[in-house]
Amino acid sequence: MAKITLDGIRHSYMENPVEEADWALKQVDLTWDDGGAYALLGPSGCGKTTLLNIISGLLRPRRGSILFDETDVTPLPPDQRHIAQVFQFPVVYDTMTVYDNLAFPLRNRGVDPATVDKRVREVAEFIDMSHRLKERAKGLTADGKQKISLGRGLVRTDVNVIMFDEPLTVIDPHLKWQLRSKLKELHQRVKRTMIYVTHDQTEALTFADKVVVMNLGEVVQVGTPVELFEKPHHTFVGHFIGSPGMNVLPCALDNGKPILAGQPVAIANQAKGTDGKSLEIGIRPEFVSFSGPNEEGGLPVQISKVSDAGRFRIVETKCDGQTVRLLVGEGKEIPSDGARLRFDPANTRLYADGWLAE
Ligand SMILES: Nc1ncnc2c1ncn2[C@@H]1O[C@H](COP(=O)(O)OP(=O)(O)OP(=O)(O)O)[C@@H](O)[C@H]1O
């Protein structure tokens, strides 16, 4: 087990990278604490697999170094890094029994038979496979096989980190939630460092204590699921996390006050250092409401669409050509005309060139 530090990592697949866009990873500085449950979340092509391969040693970064505790492992090949990986497609030996599959990594390292037997039985119990140890892996369903892949990572005691690369891709939808909660439970029992790579916010937010959000080759925020929801550091995070995502509304600045549709908007942060930058107001639909008939002020809007989402409705409004979404609870009235919106100032923030103005 080890703390993993990524120090100034940059990587390009091009021989002679010139522009920033030529770098698949622009600049990554990150620390993964020993025993943490992390998710690496981002859209396709943002650099998740590149980062994973750099940690596992399959890829050598053009710049920067990787430390396991205080040891620089940048030049070390994968087999000397003691990392277990669970891929999209389960890697199991079909002709072997479940027992032999689980025992394989230990026997390979010359561990004595009594210790192998003890560890295999412990891990089989963890993954609910104790009753199937004698069966051939061939007969297992995809989720059973994926549990074996996971078990093979858990059986070793010398593993620094277990990395999951979109591990639920081939799992039936109705079994996904079971395996997802199993992974979470396993982390709580074994307390190994786990990194779960996904483009699915639900998987990331349910598994991880800390989520690393990536976009366009850089880390845009590291935070708990609550932090990512309540205080996105970048409009991308606000938009990517949440359903529907955060409203991102271009605005102007007048005497240090953001102006939207000709009206000043109260914000929770400060409009400092924003000169010459492109400015936007970010507010989640959860923090927008209709002003009451006797309330003063509010942004005048027209209602353009109402969709039922179970316990609430998603109301889409238009304000000066921009779309603003809000959530309206069951039984709450949606005004037919003269609608005005109220933004909760504690959850309304100004963004400059996409980044939270601080
Ligand atoms: N072997 C390669 N050669 C050249 N470019 C590559 C290679 N692998 C990845 N890239 C590019 O690097 C960038 C990051 O890709 P990467 O696979 O790391 O993203 P990802 O977030 O894992 O995407 P996905 O979720 O689709 O796997 C992309 O622009 C991709 O096209």
Image (tube, rainbow, N blue to C red):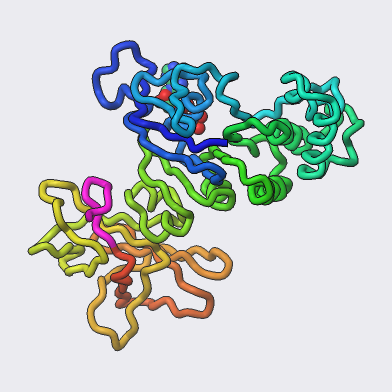
| Residue range corresponding to the magenta coloring | 349-358
Q: Is residue 49 above or below residue 271?
A: above
Quadrant where the N terminus sits is top right
Q: How many marks?
A: 0
The residue shown at (76%, 33%) is 148
Question: Which residue, as the protein is rendered here, is positioned at the far left?
Answer: 255
Position in image of residue 262 (x %, y %): 15, 66
Task: Indicate the quadrant where residue 280 lies.
Answer: bottom left
Q: Quadrant of ligand 1?
A: top left
Question: Which residue, as the protein is rendered here, is positioned at the far bottom?
Answer: 294
SS assignment for the magenta stretch, majority: strand
Q: Is residue 255 above or below residue 105?
A: below
Horizontal side of 343 relative to 102 (left or right) equals left
The residue shown at (43%, 30%) is 47
Horizontal side of 35 relative to 96 (left or right) equals left
Q: Is residue 165 visible?
A: no
Q: Is residue 328 magenta?
A: no
